[in-house]
Image (cartoon, rainbow, N blue to C red):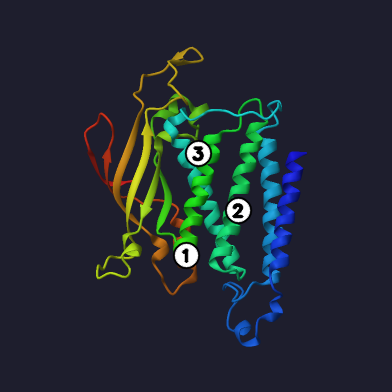
Amino acid sequence: MRFTLTVLLTIQCFFTIAQEAPDSSYTDFQSRSTFTWLDPSPVPDKGRTLGLAFGYSGLYVASMSWLYTQWYTDYPLIDFHTFNDYQEWEQMDKFAHAWNAYNIAKPVSQTFSWAGYNSRKAACYGSGISLLFQTTVEVFDGFSEEWGFSTRDMLANVVGTSAFLVQQLGWEEQRIVLKYSFHTTNYAQYRPDVLGSNFPERLLKDYNGLTHWVSINPASFLRNTSVNLPVWMSLAIGFGAEGMTGGTSNPTSVDGTPLPTFDRYRQYYLGIDFDLARIKTKSRFLNDLFKLINIVHLPAPALELSPGCKPRWHAFYF
């Protein structure tokens, strides 16, 4: 019932947005004839808005239904309850929640800009839809006996969404970008059921190989000064962890098979990054491709600073 109500409220929200959009006939003939279907509309376009409304409504219903059948149906439903998972995976999963929320809000917001909405409205709509998707998953967890509603996960979702929204409202651009990188590790072989048995699974489950980055673009902050920096060069601060074969602690054995002992520790990185979204070419395809790739921290020099370890220099860290 709650899931159905959430879907209906979402559809109602989209219809409200669609009704607020002026009819596209208000656009004069000259401006209408000078832009293509791929270009952002100069004014809110009713047809595009309705397309987004139905598209996101359908995506929401389909994705949440699929998620529920694949992830939750094997576990009993109980009364809504909370769950404290803050100590799991050295908080790396919290970075993942923030990254997800941020990187859903950004492209969704861009679609509303394409539909003709100004930067502030588009950012609000994109952030709201992102938070809706993330919150629904947390609510599912809250009614599942296997998990529970995690206030820390929800806080991370809000932080990720806010990281996008605040910048867009304040600067109308993303000067600080949340990214990630991943490399395979040897830990997954000891617990493939938990850390993944193949590359796609490990990409999602093996937090040992995952690094989250806060990529700060100095040129965007120094735009009105005499300092001249490459617009595509950014400063990257990375967060990672290693030595984890379990959530809160490492098991000594699995199904009677002893496991090696690993020290769990956090990792911090300082390096450079490339803000590909700021590189403009004459090719629309390349510009869109650069924006897509920009969610990833590309291999670049980085200094690793980890507690109890000597500083390590990586010529190309990913």
Q: Quadrant of the N terminus?
A: top right
Residue 219 lies, in percent from the top left, at 32, 64
Picture disc at residue 225 = none
Q: Is residue 318 visible?
A: no
Rendered position, 253 above or below 140: above
Which is nearer the eye, 41 or 124? 124
Q: Amino acid at mark 1?
A: Glu
Q: Earlier in the sequence, mark 3 or mark 1?
A: 1
Helix, strand or loop at label 1? It is loop
Residue at the disc numbered 2: 128
The answer to which image quadrant residue 36 occupies is bottom right
Q: Amino acid at mark 2?
A: Gly
Residue at the disc numbered 3: 204
Q: Residues within 10 Å of mark 2 (few under 14, many from 20)?
A: some
Rendered position, 131 above or below 201: below
Count of marks overlaid on the render: 3
* CB contact under 8 Å: marks 2 and 1: no
Residue 53 falls left or right of residue 199: right
Q: Quadrant of the C terminus?
A: top left
Rendered position, 28 above or below 273: below
Q: Going 66% across and 46% down the picture, which residue do you hit?
A: 63
* Distance between the alpha carbons at the discs numbered 3 and 1: 31 Å
Q: Going 61% across and 43% down the picture, which residue do you hit?
A: 135
Residue at the disc numbered 1: 172
Residue 121 lies, in percent from the top left, at 58, 64
Residue 58 falls left or right of residue 156: right
Labels 3, 1: front one = 1
Residue 103 lies, in percent from the top left, at 51, 52
Residue 159 falls left or right of residue 29: left
